[in-house]
Every structure is written in C-alpha cells, then in structure tokens.
Amino acid sequence: MREVQMENVHPLRLRLLLEIERTGSISAAADQCAIAQPSASMHLRTLETAIGQRLVSRSVRGSSLTPAGRVVASHAARALATLDTMRRELDALDGRNVGELTLAASLTPSVVLLPRILRQLSDRHPGMDIRLRTLPSETVVKEVVRGTAGIGIAGEVPTTDPVVRRQILVDELVGIAPVGLVRFEGGCVTLGELARHALVVGGDGSSTRIVTERYLARAGYRPARVCVFDSYAAITSAVADGLGVSFVSRLLVREHVERGELIAFRVSGVERMARPIHIVQPAATELRAEDAAFMALLDEAPWSAVNRWQPAAAVDPLSAEAYRAPKVLAQAQPD
C-alpha cells in the first residue's frame, strides 16, 4: 500500500481541491485561491502525486472530483477547519481577536431570521468577526460536515451525513404569480389552472424545491414545463415578468405582495406546504466559544417576532380580500 507523501499535502492544495469541487472549474478555483491557473494545475499534479491517485476529472463541461478526490476533499475540509481553529486560538492568546463565527444558512434564515440576532451578537461581542455564507440548504449541511461552517441553518433536506438537527421554526411555502395570470376559485388556484402555467423552481439542493415538489406530487400534479433558476431574485423577477408561477417562503415574499408586484396563493386540494427550518451542527463535536454565544442568543430569540413579520389578518396576501382586489404594479420590470 503506497504511503501518502504528507510533506506535499499543503493547505493551499487542499483548499484548491475544495474550490474545484465547489466551482466545477480549475480556473475559478485558482481565482478563489488567488493563484494563476498554471500554478493551480501544478499544485494539483503535486497533490495527486502525493496521494497516489487521480483526484480531478476534466471534461469540456468543467472539472469534477473523482471518488478518490471526494474522499480527500472530505478530510481536507476538516483539516483546514482544524488549522483555522488553531490560528484563532493563537490569535486570542495574543489578544488580537476574540474569535470568528462562521455560519452557513439558506436564504430565508439569512434574510429574515439572522440579521437581528447577528446584530445582538455583535453588540455583546464587539471584537468577534462574523462570516455568513448564504447557500442552498443541501450545501449548508455539507459545509457543516466539512467543518467550513461551525453552525448551519437550513430548510428540510434529506441527508445521511453525521449532523445533529434541531427545528427552530416552521415556514410556509406559498404560490406566487403576477397579477392577472392565474384564475381563482374560492380564493385558491386549482391544480388544473396551475397546470396551465410553467413551474419556476430553484436549483438542486434547494429545500424550497424539494418541499414544493413533494407536496404537489402527493396531489397528483405534474408540471407541463419546468424552468430552473439558481437564485430567489431571478425566480421572483421571472414570475413578475409572466414566465410562470413558483412557490417560495411566505416570509420572503410578503413585501413583494404588499407592493403589488406579485400575488400569493394556495392550491385547492393541496395541504399547506409546511417547511421546517433547522439548526445544523456537527455530530459529536463540542461547540466553540463563538458558536456557543450564537446559540445562546438563538435560544433567547423571541420566535413569536417572526409571526409579526408576516402580514396581519387584515392585510394577509393569502386572504380572499387580497384575491378580490389585488394591487396592480404599473409596468414594473425586473432588474
């Protein structure tokens, strides 16, 4: 059995491998590591020689990790996280900082839940650095497993990874459409009416897409046409421009509805689309001081405040009154 040449397993090469996995491109990974592409290719060859196996597969569509590359990447993330923790602890000894909180969160928590908590955290710990990455829920879980995020907050996604999840909130997904696109019966949209329009969804790994497709499939709905977009902004702009309908977090879409850019709806014969939001933590790993400070604030958070961010009953965009007299946005165009 060939020994790994550990002296050539440099942190830069491990990070390069992780960036290739994330971006699907050696040149993009090189940019993220602040090195030139020829240098990246050289580092990659050196790492493959040190490991003794091919780690990256190249094609006209980009670069991806081989099975051996994925094994190395899973250990690389944990190794880099350990080195980063060592650096922060050494800095703390010298009084240079009091730590860094690294979070990964899906869009709804990033936009709706976290700003207030992170502001309170910053007030209590003014020397703490905060790093938040907004990612699809599936990727959030992977970031926690790899150790590149200390804590994750994500919607419901299936996983066999070694993580601990705790539900903190139940979100609801609602349909959205531009004013006048869909017809209503009894304040809801029928499955037949829904089938007349394209379904606009998020990319793979989106808990919104996973939950939407599960609820609609249970009701026997099969879209005639599906359009996939990688961002919430692109989805809402496409829907506002009449491309089709979509299903998104009620917490996110409230302001679009109140401004009259979109209408929100539920579907006849489909139960309300409940989507749990979870805290995700590594299994069998002690919380660092920064993570514990964040979790303490999270436990103190008045989650009833989330309900206040939703429309009151009198102006609920899902009410029959909203359907009868929707606001009309005058010639609004997406950015």
Image (cartoon, grey):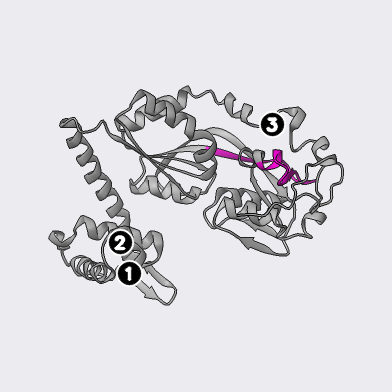
Q: Residues within 10 Å of mark 1 (few under 14, many from 20)?
A: many
User: Residue 67, image x and y in percent?
Assistant: 35, 65
Residue 175 is left or right of residue 186, and the answer is left
Q: Residues within 10 Å of mark 3 (few under 14, many from 20)?
A: some
Q: Is residue 39 above or below residue 195?
A: below
Position of residue 51 in the picture relative to residue 158 (left or right): left
Indicate which disc residue 56 carries.
Answer: 1
Which disc is residue 254 wearing? none
Residue highlighted by disc 2: 17
Is residue 249 visible from the viewing direction of this image? Answer: yes
Residue 212 rendering spot, x and y as whole percentages: 65, 50
Image coordinates for residue 266, horizontal then vertical, percent: 75, 43
Label at residue 311: 3
Three-letter code for the amino acid on which mark 3 is drawn: Pro
| Residue 257 is inside the magenta segment | yes
| Nearest to N terminus: mark 3 or mark 2 | 2
Give the camera-side residue of 1 and 208.
Answer: 208
Tell me which label, 1 or 2, sits earlier in the chain. 2
Q: Amino acid at mark 2?
A: Leu
* Residue 15 counted in the magenta span: no
Dot 1 lies on which element?
strand
| Residue range (magenta) | 256-277
Q: Is residue 243 left or right of residue 4?
A: right
